[in-house]
Image (cartoon, rainbow, N blue to C red):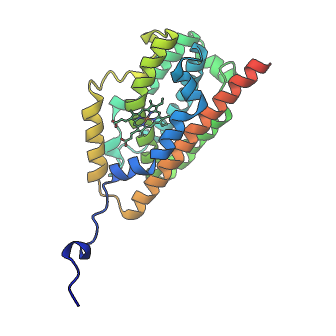
Amino acid sequence: MSAPAVESALPQAPAALSQQLKTHTASAHTAAEDSRFVAELMGGTLDVAALVSLLDQSIVIYRALETALAAHTEHPQLGAFIDRKLARVAALEADMAYHHGADWEAQLADGRIVIVPATLAYADMLTTMGRESIEFLLAHHYVRYMGDLSGGLIISRMVERHYGVASEGLNFYDFDAIAKPKPYKDRYRELLDTTDFSRAQQDAILNFAAESFELNLAVFVDLDAARKAARAS
Ligand code: HEM
C-alpha cells in the first residue's frame, strides 16, 4: 500500500476569522442590500423622509450598542476593538437636530419620531445580550461598523445625489476621525485574526453576526411596512 500524499495527511489550516465572517454572512449581506427599503432608497425612488426614518432608527440602535460597548473597554479580547474614532452617537445626535430641530429628544420620547418594533427589539437585544456575551457584542460591532465604513459611504453618496440631503444632515456616514476607511478595515480584520478566540468563541461570533444581519434586515422590513401604512392612511 502506498503512503498517503503528504498534503492530504496535513490538517487543513482553519480560515482566518475575518474571512470566515465575510463568507458566513455573504448571503445575509446580499439579502440586506436587496431588501425593498434599501434597494428603493439607493435607487432614488424614496424621499428625504425615508432617509431620516433610517437615521431615527440608527440613533436608538447606536445608543444601545455604544452603551453596551462602554462597559467592556478593558476586556482583554473585545477592548482593543472599541475605538472612539468609530463612535456614531454624537454624529447621529447632530443629524437628529438637523432634520427634526432642537427638540428632537422630546419628539423621540413622545413618539412623534417613529421607532419601528424591529428597532426596539434590536436595541433591547443589544442591551440584554450585551451585558453577558462579548462574542455577541463583537459580532454586532463588526456588522455595524464594518458595514458603515463600507456600504455606509455608498449610501451617503447616493442619498446626497438622489434626494439632495445636505452633508450637515449626514454626519452619521462621515467618519471624520478615519481619513481612509480601507487601511482602517484592513487593521480591523488583522485584529480579528490575531486575537486569540477559542473555536467555540469563533463559532458564537459567526452565528451572532448572521443573526445581527437578520435584526438589521427586520428593521428595513418594518420601515418599508411603516411607509406603506402611512401612504394607505
Ligand atoms: C445599499 C446597501 C449596501 C451596500 C451598497 C453595501 C456595500 C458594501 C461593500 C461594497 C462592501 C465591501 C467593502 C470591502 O470589501 O472593503 C461591504 C462590506 C460590508 N457590509 Fe455592506 N453594503 C450595504 C448594506 C449593508 C448592510 C445593511 C449591512 C449590515 C447591517 C452591511 C454590512 C457590511 C459588512 C459587515 C461588511 C464587511 C464585510 C467584510 O469585509 O468582512 N452592509 N458592503
Residue 119 at least partly seen: no
Q: Position of residue 188 (x, y in %)?
A: 30, 41
| Relative vertical location of residue 135 with respect to residue 156 in this rendering, above or below | below
Name the residue at the right extreme: 233
Residue 128 at least partly seen: yes
| Relative vertical location of residue 147 with respect to residue 179 in this rendering, above or below | below
Q: Is residue 181 left or right of residue 136?
A: left
Q: Position of residue 96 (x, y in %)?
A: 53, 17
Work out whether residue 185 or residue 157 is closer to the camera in this orientation and state it: 157
Q: Position of residue 69 (x, y in %)?
A: 43, 41
Q: Position of residue 202 (x, y in %)?
A: 40, 58
Residue visible at 56% across and 44% down in the picture: 214
Name the residue at the front extreme: 1
Q: Is residue 137 left or right of residue 233?
A: left
Residue visible at 59% across and 28% down in the picture: 37
Q: Quadrant of ligand 1?
A: top left
| Relative vertical location of residue 48 with respect to residue 57 in this rendering, above or below | above
Locate the N terminus and report the quarter of the image it occupies: bottom left
Work out whether residue 27 or residue 96 is closer to the camera in this orientation and state it: 27
Q: Is residue 151 left or right of residue 58?
A: left
**Count of numbered marks:** 0
Residue visible at 29% across and 52% down in the picture: 193
Name the residue at the bottom extreme: 1
Residue visible at 20% across and 85% down in the picture: 3
Locate the C terminus and report the quarter of the image it occupies: top right
- Give the image quarter of residue 124: top right
